[in-house]
Amino acid sequence: MAMAKTTSRNAARKAAYLMDCATTYYPEPLTLVSGEGAYVTDEEGRRYLDFFAGIAVLVAGHNHPQVSAAVHDQAGKLVHTSTLYLNEPVLDLAEKLSELSPPGLDKVFVGNSGTEANELAAVLARHFTKRSEFIALAHAYHGRSAWTVGLTGLSSWRNFGAEPSKVVFAPNAYCYRCPLHLTYPSCGIACAKAVEDVIKTETSGNVAAYYAETIQGVGGIITPPPEYYGIVKEILDRHGILFIADEVQTAWGRLGHNLFGISDWGVIPDIVTSAKGLGNGLPISVVIARREIADAYAGPHINTFGGNPLSARAAIATLDVIETEGLTANAAAIGDHLLARLRDLARAHPIVGEVRGRGLMIGIELVSNRDSKEPAPAAAERVLNLSKDKGLLIGRGGLYANTLRIQPPLVITRAQADEAAGILDDALGVADREFAQA
Ligand SMILES: Cc1ncc(COP(=O)(O)O)c(C=O)c1O
């Protein structure tokens, strides 16, 4: 009884003191008190297999001893400098990232969030190209910021490049619901070629950059075919448009094979933005750009918490763990196994329309009817809640909110993947009965 009281007390405190805009999962939101590896524990002592990792963040798992030790050590020395002063950890991190990044991406800015990283990438692109328009993809998610520069009444800080720009959207490579009503591979990757039509018909030709999440995360784990980025990059190069790869979710080994997911498509972007997994839970983001692009903008730029030494130490430790524990290879091996298990489930459960993804970034799109592909958001909600009740945390996304998102820490074992698949099997069985049309 005492346990139930804690839950309702926190729900009441949430209602009283936290803004409703802070989205929480589950009708009775979970309060998490500790974590270890792939597990988290709530305030009532219940343990969950965490297959969402705090929105795809904990790549090295919760409370990794090496990351915690680095943070504790730094906390005893210096926790803040701002970008006005240098600190050794941020220099070490920038040097390391410059070595680990795709060839030519040499210069780094360290901030706090993916949103900030994408803002700065736009500023760099505008300064370098002296152009002002942008292309993004349908169903993209790149952050949530307002236009604070527009509110700033100091001309020295109202620098060109941070004001709102024209954005046009190109079709995304959503093969399951092809925006061009074609079928892969006979489509000839028409969605990639459509980027050229968008440049010619929807812009003035004054395009600074094209932004893409390597795999769209919030948009529902939309995974472009292998040819997609090569075709797009060739078009962009012909038009002098920069390619900004938003690797906020897809970097740090999550897709298996490479540290940066975009490398799997065999192209080198002009700018990479990332955040999430890099600090294994500590807030940090990076913009990594070609030297000449970075050098085209000498500022002014300032970030109070940017270049934070504590987050930088966490990031360096996380990169070490990814390397020494072979987490990228683990993401590939366990990801392949989990994808195969989930594709078996898709055959058995009519509620599943498609399983897609790469490495440990997997989506399960639910539909009430496989022929009409009618999205089933209520079924996704049901599976999310049932899974939690059985001890598994997963995420949810997509334009129709009908795609389950599986983005666990990269440390998960085959046994944990099997346990998760078992829980999903049961939950999907319930969703079949309640939501799938015969
Ligand atoms: C691909 C992508 N870009 C940018 C962001 C924004 O990052 P943040 O929430 O750290 O501002 C997100 C957040 O989910 C994201 O998934």
Image (tube, rainbow, N blue to C red):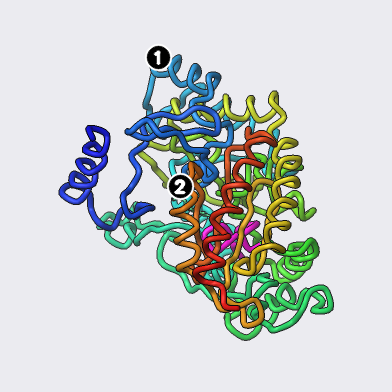
- Compare residues 319 and 353 and report the one nearer the observer: 353
Helix, strand or loop for disc 1: loop
- Compare residues 319 and 102 and report the one nearer the observer: 319
Judged left or right of residue 276, residue 252 is right
- Compare residues 392 and 324 and report the one nearer the observer: 392
Q: Can you identify the residue that label 1 sits on?
A: 77
Residue 118: x and y in percent read: 50, 54
Rendered view: 333 above or below 15: above
Residue 164 lies in magenta, yes or no?
Answer: no
Image quadrant in which the N terminus is located = top left
Tag 2 near tag 1, CB within 8 Å? no
Residue 286 visible from this viewpoint: no
Helix, strand or loop for disc 2: helix
Which of the numbered marks, if any, corresponds to residue 277? none
Give me the residue at 70% from left, 47% from top. 338
Q: Can you identify the residue that label 2 sits on?
A: 388
Q: Amino acid at mark 2?
A: Lys
Image quadrant in which the C terminus is located = bottom right
Within 8 Å: ligand 1 and the Cβ of disc 1?
Answer: no
Residue 52: x and y in percent read: 52, 46
Give me the residue at 18% from left, 44% from top. 13
